[in-house]
Image: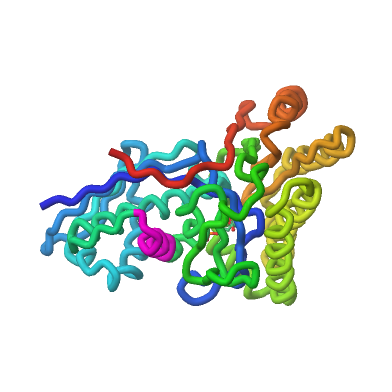
Amino acid sequence: MIHNASWRAPSNIALVKYWGKYGLQLPRNPSLSFTLSACYTDMQVAVEHIPVTPGVSVLYEGQPRPSFEPKIRLFFNLISDRFPWLKDSMVSINSRNTFPHGAGIASSASAMCALALCLLEIDGQISGHKNLLDDDWLRAASEIARIGSGSASRSVFPIAAIWGETVASDNSSDAYAIPWGPQLAEVYKDYRDTILIVSASEKSVSSTAGHRLMEQLPYADIRYSQARDHLIQLCRIMEKEGDEMGFAAIVEAEALQLHALMMSGPQPFILMEPATLAIIRKVWSYRRETGIPVCFTLDAGPNVHLLYPSRHQPAVMGWVQDELVGYCSEGRFIEDRVGSGPEKLA
Ligand code: PMV
């Protein structure tokens, strides 16, 4: 018998960054992210009980991708106590992304989130326990996604999510993310994220190597405690309208710190491109001149996420077209926004 599940799972962009981990993908500091809308993974998973030749096969955009299989096998080994049927099944995965793979737009977040949702749904079909989408089910999905890729734990929830223990919420946990959308002021529930594709090529440092680097930095503990403080401050700011400039200051500090950490190790990485820096300077002068609270954030790559309230969309997009498109690879950018979370596909 073949079991099937299909899910669409969004990417997310961290406002307070997770960088540094221990144990089974547990975070050294809590993180907070916006769930995105236009950047997502669509995935179909088929599971067939074949005890003689269990294994994994991956199609990405319709083509075989054996290079993805070792990471997925490792993930399956880590979760095989939870899903024992993985040990004697053939799992066929077929996925596609709406954004370039490996360009610092967390593709592992959307892919691992989609995979966790598919596996949990199939587990329900096999075991007969189908509590699809209730709170415990979503929490389990977040926990499984976390084991695949830490940031994926946050993609399970609409609008915004917090992953990692913080005094900002009694329910927070290092093991899974919690929804943070309901706590936000309306302005943040509709924030825009225009992603300027400075480069769509593969990342030159994996996030695994980046997290490992943190173990070698003498100021890692100071970074973790600052991230904890940033998260509390940002939660307070985002509960109310009116301090989008305060939001901008913390979000930009987080992005620059992430990159500064990567530049500071014994084997430094520079993930910004000259165009990244040029865009950052443009953001600062535009914000100063117009008073529009647009800000930037960066993931572990050169692309720039411009975050701003939706009411400023016409002005910001005009500015992007006039002044920033020239910095983008082949003029590419993605108009994204805060999104409504994963969706079960027919
Ligand atoms: O989930 P990972 O292990 O790929 O780490 C992602 C880390 C950042 O994207 C750089 C920050 C974050 O919190 O998403």
Residue 195, x across and y down, in percent: 63, 37
Q: Quick check: 163 above or below 68?
A: below
Q: Quadrant of residue 336?
A: top right
> In the rendered image, which quarter contains the C terminus?
top left
Residue 197, x across and y down, in percent: 62, 36
Residue 200, x across and y down, in percent: 57, 38
Instruction: State whether residue 71 appears in this view.
Output: no
The stretch of residues the image draws in magenta is 133-143
Q: Quick check: 205 above or below 287?
A: below
Q: Is residue 76 left or right of residue 52?
A: right
Residue 268, x across and y down, in percent: 69, 62
Instruction: State whether residue 173 appears in this view.
Output: yes
Q: Quick check: 137 above or below 57?
A: below
**Nearer the observer, 34 or 217:** 34
**Nearer the observer, 262 or 95:** 95
Does residue 316 show up magenta in the picture? no
